[in-house]
Image (tube, rainbow, N blue to C red):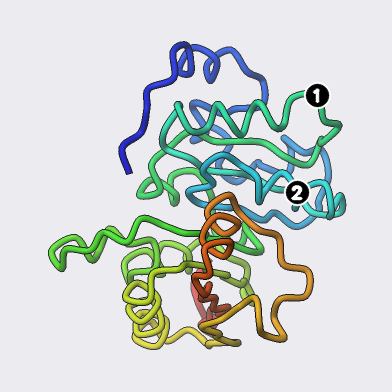
Amino acid sequence: MRLRNVKGAREAMVESTLVFDEPKEWKGRWHEVFENDHPIHIEIGMGKGRFIVEMAQTHPEINYIGIEKYSSVLIRALEKREGLELPNLYFIRMDAEEINEVFTENEVDQIYLNFSDPWPKDRHAKRRLTSTQFLARYDALLVPEGHLEFKTDNVGLFDFSLESVQEAGWELLYETRDLHHSPYMEGNVMTEYEAKFSGMGNPICKLAAMRHHSEGKEL
């Protein structure tokens, strides 16, 4: 997808108190940002923010952090967030590969991946957010029973993700290749892409997985 450069987006990121442009200094201290000890859920690649804003509105007992690399996209999420009383939602502008420089062990309870870039070429497989390389990164920051939820309309990426979950030794909690006609639809919050693709009749795939906490893991 070619991203249109939004004039002033980068400057708005720097000026906003809702966006962490240098998040590494908060590693291990995110509960201080929210001023409570509620669970922390993160969405990696949140796009324009429809999903995470609605989640934060629906679940005030959970702290949410939306992560997005592109200022021109993140600005749209910021626009949705401004004017809303949502003390449980902040944003980070960063590349997902730096995730372990921003969160420490046992700091995150749940990760959401929605309609991630499929990186279709085989040589780019490790860049996919559901690759074993990324699952290892998530393993290092999730709580012992930490969950991952992933949605996509890309069947090839979904097949790859199922293989990665198995290869990484995670426990697959459920999978569906037609979310909107499945028992897992209850409580589902749609993203912009999901609304668009399902509206076109494209089935949405979803999986949920839980990391196996390794006993005797050194802290």
* Residue behind mark 2: 54
Q: Residue furthest left?
A: 123
Sort mark 1 into few (<14), some (14-19) or many (20+) by Cα contacts within 10 Å: few
Left or right: residue 41 versus residue 67 is: right
Question: Residue 169's image quarter?
Answer: bottom left
Residue 74 appears left or right of 156: right
Residue shown at the point (42%, 37%) measured from the top left: 69
| Residue 42 at least partly seen | yes
Q: Amino acid at mark 2?
A: Glu
Callout 1–callout 2 Cβ contact below 8 Å: no
Residue drawn at the location 50% of the way across and 51% of the way down = 44
For disc 1, the marked residue is 83
Residue 52 appears at what percent x and percent y? Answer: 67, 48
Residue 111, quarter of the rendered image = bottom right
Q: 43 or 38: which is nearer to us?
A: 43
Q: Earlier in the sequence, mark 1 or mark 2?
A: 2
Q: Quadrant of residue 136?
A: bottom left
Q: Residues within 10 Å of mark 2 (few under 14, many from 20)?
A: some
Q: Position of residue 163 (x, y in %)?
A: 35, 85
Name the residue at 66% across, 26% down. Answer: 79
Please tell me whether mark 1 sits on a helix, a strand or a loop: loop
Say what amino acid the circle numbered 1 marks.
Gly
The kind of secondary structure element at disc 2 is helix
**Between 89 and 28, the one nearer to me in the picture:** 89
- The vertical placement of 191 against 88, above or below, is below
Looking at the image, the residue that sits furthest to the front is: 200
Residue 206 vs residue 38: left or right? left
Disc 1 from disc 2: Cα separation: 14 Å
Name the spot of residue 105 as percent of width and height, x first: 55, 59
Q: Is residue 210 in view from this perspective? A: no
Q: Which circle marks residue 27 in the picture? A: none
Q: Quadrant of the N terminus?
A: top left
